[in-house]
Image: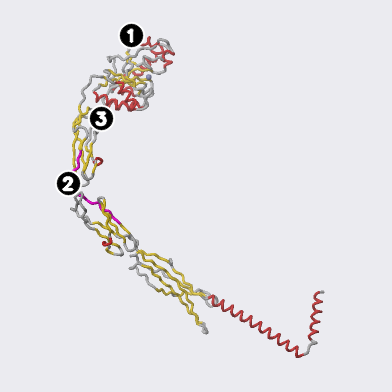
Amino acid sequence: MKQLAGKKGKRKEEDWIEDLPPMYLERRKQRKRKKLLRGLLRAAVFVAVLAAVWFWNGFAVDIRLAGDSEVTLEYGEDYTDPGAQARFSGNLLQRTPLEVAVDVNGVVDTAHLGTYTLTYTARHKLDLRILKLTFTDTATRTVHVVDTQPPLLQLITKPDHSTPPGQAYEEEGFTAVDNYDGDITHLVERVEKEGTVLYKVTDSSGNANEILRQIRYSDLVTPELTLLGDAHVRIPQWGSYTEPGFSAVDNVDGDITGRVTVSGSVNTDVVGTYLLEYSVADSYNNTVTATRTVTVEKVTPNGKVIYLTFDDGPSAHTQRLLDILNKYNVKATFFVVKTGYLHLLSGMAAAGHTVAIHSASHQYARVYSSEDAFFTDLREMQSIIRNYTGKTVTLLRFPGGSSNTISRNYSNGIMTRLTTRIKQMGYRYFDWNVDSQDAGNATSAADVYNNVVNGIGNRNVSVVLQHDTEGFSVEAVDSIIRWGLSKGYTFLPLNAGSPACEHKVAN
Ligand code: ZN
C-alpha cells in the first residue's frame, strides 16, 4: 500500500516538473551536474590527503642503542662502544625492513674524567623519481668517566727514629699518590695528638683516605716487676701451690701487670725444687725478669691416722674410686653388700684394701627381725666375700651402724644382743666418728670434702664414713687424700688390730 502511495506521489511530481518551461528545466539540470562534480572533487581530495598521510607515515628510520643509554666508567677502564642498529621501514614500497648504516659522533676520553655524549645518526634516502625524500633518526648515549678510588697514603718510618717522652714529634715523612691526580702529598693534612698523628687527604673527585701513626717514644727505662709473697716458697708434698701474684709498672706504659708471663710449673706430687720465671716487656722491648723458687717438701708424718671406709658398694663408681686410691697408694676399707659389681672384690683385696661385711640384703626389716635372720644374712655376705677373695672376714659394720634405732621397729633390744654376741663369736664391728653426710645433707664433692676435713679436725684416729654408691662422694676422695697426705696423716685400712670405733648402742 505504501509503495503504491510513493509511486503515485513521484509520478505526481514528475508530472508537475514537465509542466515547467524548457529553459528553466535546462538550468536546473546544469545546477544538478555542477553540484555532483563538486561533491566528487571533494571526495577525491579527501582520499588523496588520506593516502599521502598514510604513505608518509609508513616510512621511518628507527635507531636502537645496544647497551644502556647512560654508562658510568671507572677512570682507567677502556671504553668500547656497544654501537647501535638502525632500520628503515615503509608500508607499501618497503615491506621488509632495511638495515641502515649508523654514524657515531663524539668521543669518550677515558684519560680524562667527565661526561661525554655520543650521538648516533641514521639516514635513508628514498628516490621516487618525482620525489626525493630523506628520512633521519638520532639517539644519544651519555658516558660518565669517574674516579672513585681513594688516594694511597703511606707513612715513612725511619728505623732509628724515636722521640724522647715529653718532646715534640719530628715528622719522618709521608706520601699521598692518587690514581688520577698523581702526587698529592702537598694536600695532606696532619692532626697530632696524644702520641699519634692522623694524616688525611682527599683527591679531586672527593675520595678521602686517612692513616694513623703511633709516635714511638724512646724509652730506656725497664719496667719494675714486683713479686708478691716470698721469693722462696715451701709447700708440703700433695699440698696445693697458689700463685701469690705479681705486679709490673712501666714509666711509659703504666700498669703492665697483664703482660707478665710466667714460665715453669710446680708439681706438688713430686718432692723437689721448682723455678718459676716471671718476665715482662714494655712497648720498647725493655724486659725484666724475676724468679721464684718453690720447694715441695716431703711431709713429716703427724702420727695421726685416717681410715677411709666406704659402705653399700661395690657400684658403678667403685672402679674410679679404686683408681684414685691406687694413684696415692692409699688403702681403704669397703663394707660391701650383695650388688651387681661383686667381681671387683677380688681386685680390691689383691690391692691391699680391706673387704669387710656390711650386709647381703641391707634390708632392715629382714636383717633386724631376729638374731638368726641377722646371722643368716651376715654369713651369706661372708661367703660371697670368701668366694671372691679366698678370705674369711670377721670385720663388719652393722647396717645403719650399731647405734641405729630403726631396728627397734623389728626387734626390741636386738642391737644390744647382737653387739655382745658378735664379739663373743670373734667378730669385730666398726662404726665411724667422721660422717661425710653423703647419705644426708651433702649434695656435692665440695660438701663431702668440707664435712670430712672439718670432721677430722684434730682427731688422732678418724674413721670416715662414705658411700661408694655416690658419684659425688667418690669425686671428693682425691682432694681428701691430698689434704690428708699434705698434713702428715697416714691412711690405713681397718683390720683386726685397729683401734675400736663403736657408737653407743641405742636399741
Ligand atoms: Zn649401709
Residue wearing tag 1:
424
Quadrant of the displayed image that contains ligand 1: top left
The quarter in which the C terminus is drawn is: top left
- What span is colored magenta in the figure? 210-225
| Mark 3: secondary structure | loop
Kind of element beneath mark 1: helix
What's the amino acid at mark 2?
Leu
Q: Is mark 2 within 8 Å of ligand 1?
A: no
Distance CA(mark 2)–CA(mark 3):
39 Å
Q: Is residue 255 above or below residue 394?
A: below
Disc sitting over residue 311 in the figure: none
Q: Earlier in the sequence, mark 2 or mark 3?
A: 2
SS for dot 2: loop
Q: Indicate if the residue with disc 1 has its beta carbon within 8 Å of ligand 1.
A: no
The residue type indicated by label 1 comes to Gln
* Distance from Cα at disc 2 to Cα at disc 1: 86 Å
Residue 314 magenta: no
Q: Find disc 3 in the rendering and name its residue.
A: 240
Q: Which of 111 and 125 is in front in this view?
A: 111
Which residue does the numbered mark 2 point to in the structure image? 220
Residue type at mark 3?
Answer: Ser
In which quadrant of the rendered view does residue 414 lie?
A: top left
